[in-house]
Amino acid sequence: MAKQMTEPHRQHQRDTERPPRHSPSETSLDVGSAVLEGRPRHGTRSGRKAIFELEGVDVAYSGKTAVRNITFDVAENEITALIGPSGCGKSTLLRCLNRMNDLVPGATVEGRIEYHGQDLYGASVDPVEVRKRIGMVFQKPNPFPKSIYDNIAFGPRVLGMKGDMDQLVEAALRRAALWDDVKDRLKDNAFGMSGGQQQRLCIARALATGPDVILMDEPCSALDPISTGKIEDLMMELRESYAIVIVTHNMQQAARVSDMTAFFTVELEDEGASRTGRVVEFDETEKIFTNPADPRTEAYVTGKVG
Ligand SMILES: Nc1ncnc2c1ncn2[C@@H]1O[C@H](COP(=O)(O)OP(=O)(O)OP(=O)(O)O)[C@@H](O)[C@H]1O
Ligand SMILES: [Mg+2]
């Protein structure tokens, strides 16, 4: 954290090409949800506002530490990539960001995770509200066995969101670049869609509850290159309105789409008795891929290990 604060604020090259941003609260998808209010402690390296600030985060399963001492920020309107070898705790950390680990028996989270400057694990925070504001998309597209329309409407209905449901469904599908594909078959079962379309439906479903963050755990690993390209294009569009955190094993993908990258590794502890994930390096993606500070990062991103 100290290193990050003392470095000069640098703008990512692509920033100059970006259109003006707007906040999700200005979109038609927001139907008056109560945003967790607070103020982040400091700006991020790019100068954008921090959405998440992680400090000294440890996660354990039944007392066995899976990741230790994780410290980095996630900024608004940026894509943050989590990369590293299998088992280093990328999914574990991602699940902490919307309190999904609350649902895993024996999982404990220590350290501090702030969301908009508020303790995400504070007693007054409602985990349901958290999951509404912080959407998640998984490796395998997992639509509900329902119509395309009902997949999108499900979350807003459960949450009792008010507003014109047809309009909300259309807005979410448009945002996920899926409207033109499905507008004539909204009542068809979602299982009739291609894998890539199903994944975009899952993204639309996450957008329907009016989040400001989308967490993606290897969202393209089950998809062909064309569908992968569509999801990547979509991520670049969504970045203008949301913060995105993506776990990926695809180095080209991390380099193509992300602004910031956290490289995780697994270290043997207790004389080899336990394996614990740590962040080796967190920096601008360009730096991680062209001039990393740590030789372990370089070995991984150049494919020498991992
Ligand atoms: N539900 C769970 N219960 C117990 N241990 C778990 C659970 N989920 C993950 N772990 C352990 O936590 C460690 C990190 O796992 P995690 O799935 O977060 O890694 P990952 O980096 O996402 O790996 P991959 O790239 O293979 O998806 C591993 O040692 C794993 O066995
Ligand atoms: Mg994983």
Image: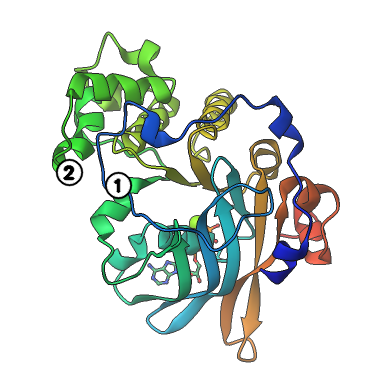
In the image, residue 222 sits, relative to residue 54, either above or below, namely: above
Q: Please, which residue is most extreme toward the top here?
A: 184
Q: Label 1 amino acid?
A: Lys
Q: Count of labels shown?
A: 2
Residue at 44 percent of width and 45 percent of height:
213
Residue 62 percent across, percent down from the top left: 37, 81
Q: Earlier in the sequence, mark 1 or mark 2?
A: 1
Q: Position of residue 180 (x, y in %)?
A: 38, 11
Give the residue at x 54% y 27%.
Answer: 237
Q: Quadrant of the C terminus?
A: bottom right
Specify whether residue 236 is in view: yes
- Separation of residues labelled 1 and 2 (CA atoms): 8 Å
Q: Which residue is mark 2?
A: 159
Figure check: 209 above or below 29: below
- The residue carrying mark 1 is 132
Q: Secondary structure at mark 2?
A: loop
